[in-house]
Amino acid sequence: MNKQNSPIRYYVSRKNPLTWLSALLAIGAFVLQILALCFGEARVISTINVWFQKVLPMAIALGIAEIVLVRGPKEFYRISKPVFWGCVYFAQIALDWHLRLAADPSLIGLVGGAYALFQYKRYVAVCWILYLAFYVIYRLFVTGKFRQVFILQLISLLPFAVLLYDFVAECSRISTYELFDKLSNVLLAGSLTAATLAMRVFNDGKYHRTWGDRADGRRLRTINGMSVVAGYIMPDRNDACNNIKDTIEISAVERYIHKKRAEGLKNFGLMHVFLAAYVRCVAKYPGLNRFFSGQRVHQRDDDIAFTMTVKKDMCVDAPDTTIKLHLTTTDTAEDVYNKLNAVIEDVKNTPLDSSFDNLAALLASFPGLILKFVVWCLKVADYFGKLPKFLTELSPFHGSVIFTSMGSLGIPPVVHHLYNFGNLPVFVAFGRKYRKTELDPEGNPVTRRYVDFVMNCDERTTDGFYYATVLKYFHKIMRAPSQLDNPPEEVLRDID
């Protein structure tokens, strides 16, 4: 994903005077709506009018001000939401006038009778179509479908110019309520125009979030159709779980481990090599760092979230807890060693009162029926990507990969399932080391050391050929693990 091919994303800067002008106009529109409400007639302050013609525009005004000042530098695309409700608001004004004409014959007489009412129906329909078209065009621009910003700026000037002309033409013969109301609408349209004029394109070559992305990953939009359909055919992760059993000859790895220990990396072991090799695989094959959530495939990019269960002591009744380690695609074996050991030591040297343990204890204290409902709510929030970030950080079910070492327990690797909750796409388990006597190419018996491992994968994120290619590259790294001492020469990016 280089600079030339990166998606088009827009932002507004707080250093731009137009950004502050947009916020001030929006706040002015909010204040004028309050004044209009105070000066409103009894007919105007009916419940439905309060909600649709006062509360709604006030919420829109505050929404625009909040987005341009707070979210504009990173998430300006969110302005499409108040734009949608703004279109609903202005379309409702036209509909409200039509309903008043139908309910009050005297008003119909003023504008030309039943024929005028019929004509006004067509006017209302045209208004709704135009407002809908405006919203669609605006959303297409701010979400990066088009780069010609000046076209959107011209289009956004039209409603502002029409409302301003109507206000100037009518201000001398309307009531105080209508004066505040119309001026508020002018300022509301003006704030959107100013925000649109302040729009700039990100030119840093980086990916910037938009609708459909999650806090822990961006949605892949150019993925093949079968991968999209598969998510609906196999909605649960266990339905799409495939396991791959493989064996690694570790002679080169053991020599590498001895070398690193001699360099001062105490307790450097097979887990560090496995994890560093996995990180290197992600650098070359970024599809390995995808995950499936909300019926869509997402990509974590540089964040490799590694999850592991750690026992405080090696005994049956020792408590255990879950750790989460964030690695990057440029990490070396020594980086992995330092980061992982720091987290493990921190867990072992503190009481069993981590945030995850406290959260699990809190949930366990709920009655069964309430706990079932809470878990259902968490699943729904997770499906729509609305689970709070601190929960996904605590959750062992959200991450890139979970590693478990059966070798430390002296048993073969377990064939572990994937979890339907969360978004973990890969579960890797490796077993104990063992010796095996074989014949070399000359027919002489040799003893080699091996480790078996099992890799459980979510097939909805990528296909079997991709995983097979990753495994071949993994074997290549394990035959020459010294390459893990240096960062990768190139880090590849996944598709858009």
Image: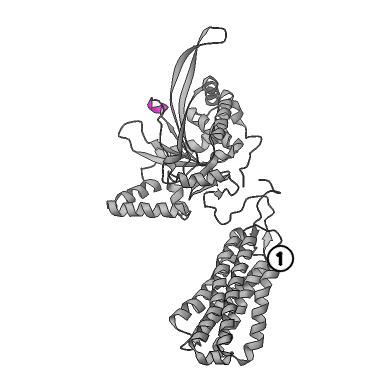
> Magenta part of the protein: which range?
407-412
Residue 450 belongs to the span the image colors magenta: no
Q: Report the residue at 66% width, 86% height from top.
A: 168
Residue matched to label 1: 151
Q: Nearer the viewer, residue 211 or 64?
A: 211
Q: Report the residue at 65% width, 83% height from top.
A: 166
Q: Is residue 346 visible?
A: no
**Residue 234: where, in percent of width, then height?**
45, 44
Q: Is residue 47 visible?
A: yes
Residue 409 belongs to the span the image colors magenta: yes
Image check: 269 left or right of 301?
left
Q: Report the residue at 62% width, 32% height from top.
A: 486
**Residue 377: where, in percent of width, then height?**
38, 55
Q: Please, is residue 105 above or below residue 210 in the view?
A: below
What is the residue that sits farthest to the front in this orientation? 115
Q: Nearer the viewer, residue 121 or 159?
A: 121
**Residue 140: where, in percent of width, then height?**
63, 61
The quadrant where residue 193 appears: bottom right
Helix, strand or loop at mark 1 = helix
Q: Please, is residue 364 above or below residue 197 in the view?
A: above
Q: Report the residue at 55% width, 92% height from top.
A: 109
**Residue 228: where, in percent of width, then height?**
53, 47
Check disc 1: other Cα within 10 Å, few if <14, some if 14-19, many if 20+.
Answer: few
Q: Quadrant of the N terminus?
A: top right
What is the residue that sits farthest to the left in this orientation? 367
Amino acid type, residue under disc 1 in the picture: Ile
Image check: 369 left or right of 325?
left
Q: How many marks?
A: 1
